[in-house]
Image: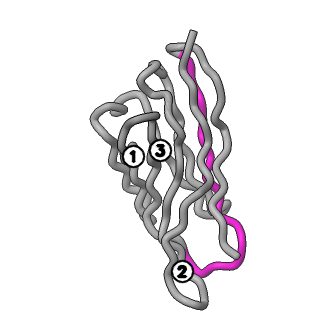
Amino acid sequence: QVQLVESGGGLVQPGGSLRLSCVASGSFRSIGATGWYRQAPGKQRELVASISSAGRINYADSVKGRFTGSRDTAKNAVYLQMNSLEPEDTAVYSCNAPIETTSGWYNSWGQGTQVTVSS
């Protein structure tokens, strides 16, 4: 069974930093472009950053200059370094990626990790 597992969330003061990780586990052939999403209470889910299999990264305007995505293919992991955090960044952050198995491609979501920015 293939899983995406996020970690790294927590409570941080405004201006602080967190680094989120999304690691794929299980048996699979390849992972497609990975997206970092967030959803705040009462709001729609928002794409924060997308990281292609080749390492190209796109960011939402709201996080440009503050968030940095990266990918470690050897570890089957993607990361989201979040700096200069603001209360508006408070949300559940999830990663999503299409994963190729011997049975075909599956759209996989992690369980999410809570990020709370508050003084």
The residue at the far bottom in this view is: 103
Q: Amino acid at mark 2?
A: Glu
* Quarter occupied by the C terminus: top right
Q: Amino acid at mark 3?
A: Gly
Circle 1 residue = 45
- Above-or-below relation of 53 to 41: below
State the CA–CA distance, disc 1 to disc 3: 18 Å
Image coords of residue 54 (percent x, y): 42, 64
State the CA–CA distance, disc 2 to disc 1: 24 Å
The quadrant in which residue 88 appears is top left
Circle 3 residue = 69
Q: Residue at x 54, y 21 (%)?
A: 117
SS category of the residue bearing label 3 = strand
Stretch in magenta: 16-30
Disc with the residue nearer the chain's start (2 vs 1): 1
* Quarter occupied by the N terminus: bottom right
Disc with the residue nearer the chain's start (3 vs 2): 3
Circle 2 residue = 100
